[in-house]
Image (cartoon, rainbow, N blue to C red):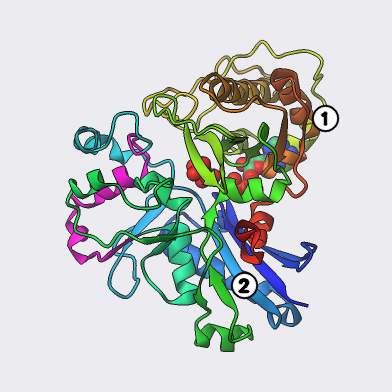
């Protein structure tokens, strides 16, 4: 019996999941980032990766056939010729690319996905103007770099992570216009998510007792991994990841791209995962409540009554979707004294943002929404699920498995190769 390991690098932590050949979970391991100050991110990720491997039982490790890793989309970093980061990674919601948008607009086609201040290409263009750029040889996404630590081959990515770098996921090549930017860096070679990149490094196989021929596969992004975990498979089915952020994925026969709203489509076989990623979500809830409070206070909410509180919950100015505005101000007033009322307003407001996202996707040509699976930390909140269902007007339920790491384990097992 062989096993498969999926590793999810999210916002608040990293999670690993080992599954068997029929997809049954054998072990789940976690590494919360909250324990560490947000300094030297790459070091924390590297430590998290190997601590997760440490936590997996030896008897499972001996039989692991393949490993895949997902990261957060458009979280990127520059590396030198041997894979050492030359400066701090930039996270998915980092908007410093705003200062290079004019140059990007002069090169990219109108309405292109890269024309967001948080796109990977905007970040690369900003990086190319920094002093440390002269030391850089490779531009990588978080998932690419973490997989490199295991397989040892620099400069390989997947066409999910590479979408926001400008990679054309229909022609499966970088577009001509990208060369106009003349950025002197190795852009990653792009392969199919889940395809085998190579065997695990011998020294890692020896240290952790993995099979010498354990394969390390190309990865994906966290919200696509969550989609793979959900069991959704028909056009019209969707997955909302209510994690630290709010990410929508609606499976559609039609590709939808509209950077005005932060809408883009990922390729999934011969279909499209239309969607977008908002900065609203669980991270805002955690600013006011612990997970325990979220659970207990939610149970006191009367879901039959809509909250009159109309917030736009953000940690800081700027959203990506369904309002693609780097200067959008958080709206969290008026704040009632009663914490139940306040939480009710927050949950309803995030539900309204989700509903607006799906409404836009359908208006722009995506298949009609038929059901919504829920992934991420907020999926356990039945009160929230009920509130969301009132706005979405379709069945809303927890995913078959709410963990992105499960979807990434399926990817390692060959889910994309079917
Ligand atoms: N009972 C709950 N109700 C709503 N949200 C919750 C609940 N428990 C946890 N969360 C949210 O889950 C989020 C973490 O989601 P998770 O998917 O685990 O992580 P990440 O998005 O960082 O990868 C937290 O920001 C928290 O607000
Ligand atoms: O917001 C995020 C953090 O969890 C997602 O990683 C990301 O932005 C979603 O992007 P994609 O749709 O490419 O998976």
Compare residues 52 and 252 and report the one nearer the observer: 252
User: Where in the figure is residue 54, as x and y percent of width and height?
Assistant: 64, 76
The quadrant holding residue 187 is bottom left
Q: Report if residue 91 is visible in the image.
A: no
The numbered mark at residue 71 is none
Residue 134 highlighted magenta (yes or no): yes
Q: Quadrant of the N terminus?
A: bottom right
Inspect the magenta stretch and tell me whether residue 73 lies in it. no
Earlier residue among tags 1 and 2 = 2
Magenta segment boundaries in residue numbering: 114-139
For ligand 1, give the image quadrant. Answer: top right
Query: In 3D space, how far apart are the residues under numbered discs 1 and 2 (Cα atoms)?
Result: 41 Å
Locate residue 304, reporting x and y percent: 82, 15
Q: Where is mark 2, residue-wise?
A: 66
Residue at numbered disc 1: 299
Q: Secondary structure at mark 1?
A: loop
Front residue of 109 and 186: 109
Mark 2 residue element = strand
Q: Residue at x 51, y 87 (%)?
A: 203
- In depth, the one of 303 and 335 nearer the eye is 303
> Is 187 above or below relative to 271?
below
Ligand 2 neighbours mark 2 (CB distance < 8 Å): no
């Amino acid at each position: 019996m062989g096993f498969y390991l999926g590793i999810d690098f999210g916002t608040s932590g990293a999670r690993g999941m080992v599954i068997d050949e029929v997809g049954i979970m054998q072990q789940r391991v976690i590494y919360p980032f909250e324990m560490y100050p947000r300094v030297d991110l790459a070091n924390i990720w590297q430590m998290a990766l190997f601590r997760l491997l440490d936590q997996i039982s030896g008897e499972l490790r001996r039989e692991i056939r393949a490993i895949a890793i997902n990261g957060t989309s458009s979280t990127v970093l520059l590396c030198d010729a041997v894979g050492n980061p030359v400066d701090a990674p930039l996270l998915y919601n980092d908007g410093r690319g705003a200062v290079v948008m004019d140059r990007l607009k002069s090169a990219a086609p109108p309405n292109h996905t890269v024309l967001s201040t948080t796109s990977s290409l905007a970040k690369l263009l900003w990086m190319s103007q920094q002093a440390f750029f002269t030391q850089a040889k490779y531009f990588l996404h978080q998932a690419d770099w973490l997989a490199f630590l295991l397989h040892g081959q620099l400069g390989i990515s997947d066409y999910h992570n590479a979408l926001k770098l400008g990679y054309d996921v229909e022609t499966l090549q970088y577009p001509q216009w990208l060369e106009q930017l003349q950025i002197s860096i190795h852009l990653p070679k792009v392969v199919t998510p889940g395809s085998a990149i190579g065997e695990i490094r011998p020294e890692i196989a020896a240290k952790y007792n993995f099979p010498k021929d354990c394969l390390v596969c190309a990865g994906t992004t966290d919200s696509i991994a969550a989609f793979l975990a959900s069991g959704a498979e028909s056009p019209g089915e969707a997955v909302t990841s209510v994690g630290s952020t709010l990410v929508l994925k609606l499976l559609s026969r039609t590709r939808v791209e509209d950077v005005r709203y932060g809408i883009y489509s990922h390729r999934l076989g011969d279909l499209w995962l239309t969607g977008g990623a908002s900065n609203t979500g669980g991270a805002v809830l955690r600013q006011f409540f612990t997970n325990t409070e979220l659970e207990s206070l939610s149970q006191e909410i009367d879901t039959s009554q809509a909250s009159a509180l109309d917030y736009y919950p953000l940690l800081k100015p700027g959203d990506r979707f369904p309002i693609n505005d780097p200067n959008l101000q958080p709206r969290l007033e008026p704040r009632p004294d009663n914490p139940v009322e306040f939480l009710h307003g927050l949950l309803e407001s995030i539900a309204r943002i989700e509903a607006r996202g799906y409404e836009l996707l359908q208006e722009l040509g995506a298949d009609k929404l038929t059901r919504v699976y829920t992934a991420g930390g907020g999926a356990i909140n039945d009160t929230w699920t009920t509130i969301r269902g009132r706005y979405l007007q379709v069945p809303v339920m927890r995913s078959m498995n709410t963990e992105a790491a499960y979807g990434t384990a399926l990817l390692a097992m060959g889910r994309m190769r079917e």
